[in-house]
Amino acid sequence: MNRYRSLVALIVLLGCAVGLLAAAKYQPPFGEWKRASEQPILSPTGDLAGIFNPAVIKHGDEYFMLTRSQDKKGTSFLQSATSKDGLHFVVTGTALKPEAPYEKDGGVEDPRLVKIDGTYYLTYTGYNTKDAQLCLATSKDLKTWERKGVILPAYKGNWNVGWTKSGAILTEKVNGKYWMYFLGTAADKTDQMGLASSSDLLHWTEETQTPVLPKREGMWDERVVEPGPPPVMTKEGILLIYNGADNKLVYRVGWALFDKTDPRKVLARSETPIFTPEKEWEKVGQVPNVVFVEGLVREGNRWMFYYGGADKYIGVVGASGR
């Protein structure tokens, strides 16, 4: 028995060593993140308590943003905003209000947005003050949205026994299927990352019996491991920016690299965060000490990441390609 335990321990240590070596060798296809604006690019006005956690996509020659906007009663809805330069946005109206039974009285929250074959797919969290569940809506023009309902219900997962949130869809098929990283709540009440697949982008099935990207004890992502913007297919693999939180619920940003032929397989993962709350408006707000990335636009050699600061403001950080 002791010999068996020693062998298991050796295998675990070797696996950790290989993972650390891969993380040390791999470099993401962008350099250091630098704030493109030292101040928020959008702040709450009027009856809003917060405007944060945005999805952003390039639509023609415009940047199109969906914001999570929250009123002073705590109810969230999605607003649209546009910009010509990716920095100066103007809110243009309400895109999605909490109307369905799985959204009422709580809100629609934390959008992610992709375009596939001429259709825009919007994943978001529907919250009815009791349950939070991962939902989907689609659009052809970014103006009219059609709800498709809850795509990963709460309390019914393989390992995620609580709420579901944060669907980040890979726009390219792998092995004939679409893939989506998402957030689930494990039995120990920590929020970790799962993986689901679909043949039609409407019906989704979990792909793993355990978290595909688990928490790490004693590290910056020991309490929350949550997908950020939609993942990107690169020559090295599937690159996913993700948001992590420690036991004090300080939110920071890191990355993970998955195998391009098997989205279940982690090739490398950042040991330290690449972006942390430093500005006053990232440290003080509705929820302190939060930078939470949800939007990504790539143009040539420039990467633009859009994030929520302290659950109250929207900021943007840029990086140059390597």
Image (cartoon, rainbow, N blue to C red):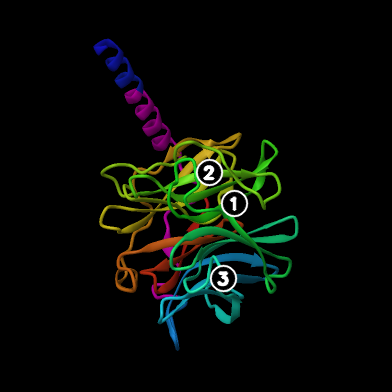
* Mark 2 neighbour class, 10 Å CA radius: few under 14, some 14 to 19, many 20 or more: many
Q: Secondary structure at mark 3?
A: strand
Q: Amino acid at mark 3?
A: Leu
Looking at the image, is 312 positioned above or below residue 133?
below
Q: Which mark is residue 195?
A: 2
Dot in front, 2 or 3: 2
Q: Which mark is residue 66?
A: 3
Q: Secondary structure at mark 2?
A: strand
Res. 322 visible in picture: no
**x, y (%) of residue 321?**
53, 52
Q: Earlier in the sequence, mark 2 or mark 3?
A: 3
Residue drawn at (48%, 74%) of the image: 105
Residue drawn at (31%, 47%) of the image: 222
Q: Amino acid at mark 2?
A: Leu
* Mark 3 neighbour class, 10 Å CA radius: few under 14, some 14 to 19, many 20 or more: many
Left or right of 41 in this view: 14: left
Q: Which residue is mark 1?
A: 169
